[in-house]
Image: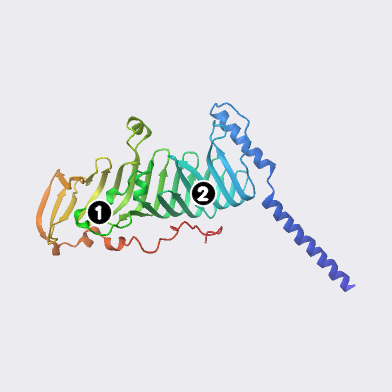
Amino acid sequence: MEKNFKKLISGLLVIIVLSMIFSFFLMVFCVKAADKERVQRLILREKQRKDLPVEPERAPEITRWDFNFRLPVTGQKDLYRWEVKGGMGRSIDSVKDRISPFVGEFMEDSEPVMLRSPTVIFDKNKRVLTSTTDVLIDLPWAKIAGRGFRFNMEDRFCKILNDCHTTIEKSEAGASPMMGNPGQVVADESSDTAGKAKKPNILKIDSRKFYYYGSEGRQVWAEEVFAWDSNGVIKADRMEAFNYSDEEKAKNPNLSGIKRIVCTGNVKIDQNTKWAVADTTVYMAESDVLILTAKPGKKATYWEESADKATATKVSANEIISYRKKNSFQATKGQQTTFDIPRSEINKVSILGFDSKKKLKLFGPKPKRMDGKIGNAEGK
């Protein structure tokens, strides 16, 4: 009797376990018909709302395993903006899916952009991606890594919430229609570097947050911003890069990439033999001119060492204009100039508030998340 009872219990346990496994496989591999119908209704509503002709379209391919789908461009048959892949996709509710790991690819100014993250929440109605885990934005000439992000797939707005690290290969970026050459503002190819071994042409930017406005052609690095290459460092509260608009490029096809870079808030610049402090700097890419300004009642200050580095000249003014191609500057509005200050009496670290030499160690171990790996599905 006791043996039969044990066999009965064992049989029931086997049935329960098999039922659980079967339910799990249904949850993972089965695609609900309601999911496809929901996507079809979404496409139909978009066309009706925008008064576009309604064309019969298939819903994007959606699977629970090896998640793969493409987002169509509204009104453009067989044309897709995004291709998304994932290891596993599971519905959170009627409009949101969790994708782990996530890989999304789209085109920006004819260049491929790859977005990777261990886990992403996808809102199918709003077409918005959000995550609290790592993210890596991979371009042909740059990598942008951080933690926690939001990406609107329609207007190409991206926000990285914390711990952002940007690495730009300036030579490749110079040929990019998206960026042009963003590194000139912190580089100083002066004569004292002649004859030395050429260093890798890399620009790095650290910041707490990063914003990308694809439809506006604008990028923003915010909070504790450090930008540096082998020849110089810029520190600011905010750094903003503006691309030439489509209208400007249509008028002049030779224009591409960055039009100007604006740094605001406690701006400090160190270019080895030249350094400056200002409230705002504006760099004009086409003319290679840097403009330093200060708030009312304050002055921007610029220092330059003598050729023998024994003395330095100090210039203060409400506005200082540096003509980089001519290696000259002009100070206006309240200029004060002091010549031949003994270099031993000037403490650059105290003036800038940081030691540039510590930031110029560009070519050691790569920062976290900058090697193209983003961890596993749990974000570790």
**Please, what secondary structure does the residue beneath circle 2 have?**
strand
Q: Residues within 10 Å of mark 1 (few under 14, many from 20)?
A: many
**Please, what secondary structure does the residue beneath circle 1 have?**
strand
| Residue 221 location (% of width, % of height) | 36, 49
Q: Which mark is residue 35?
A: none
- Front position in the image: 21 or 230: 230
Q: Residue furthest right?
A: 1
Cα–Cα gap, marks 1 and 2:
35 Å
Residue at the spot of label 1: 269
Q: Residue furthest bottom?
A: 2
Up-down relation of residue 26 to residue 285 (above or below)? below
Any part of residue 354 in sight = no
Q: Residues within 10 Å of mark 2 (few under 14, many from 20)?
A: many
- Front position in the image: 230 or 344: 230
Figure quadrant of residue 176: top left
Q: Are marks 1 and 2 in contact (CB under 8 Å)?
A: no
Label 1 sits on what residue type?
Ile
Figure quadrant of residue 145: bottom left
> Residue drawn 10% across and 54% down?
338
Report the number of numbered marks: 2
Q: Which mark is residue 130?
A: 2
Up-down relation of residue 9 to residue 295 (above or below)? below
> Residue drawn 22% across and 58% down?
195
| Residue 295 location (% of width, % of height) | 22, 46
| Residue 284 location (% of width, % of height) | 26, 42
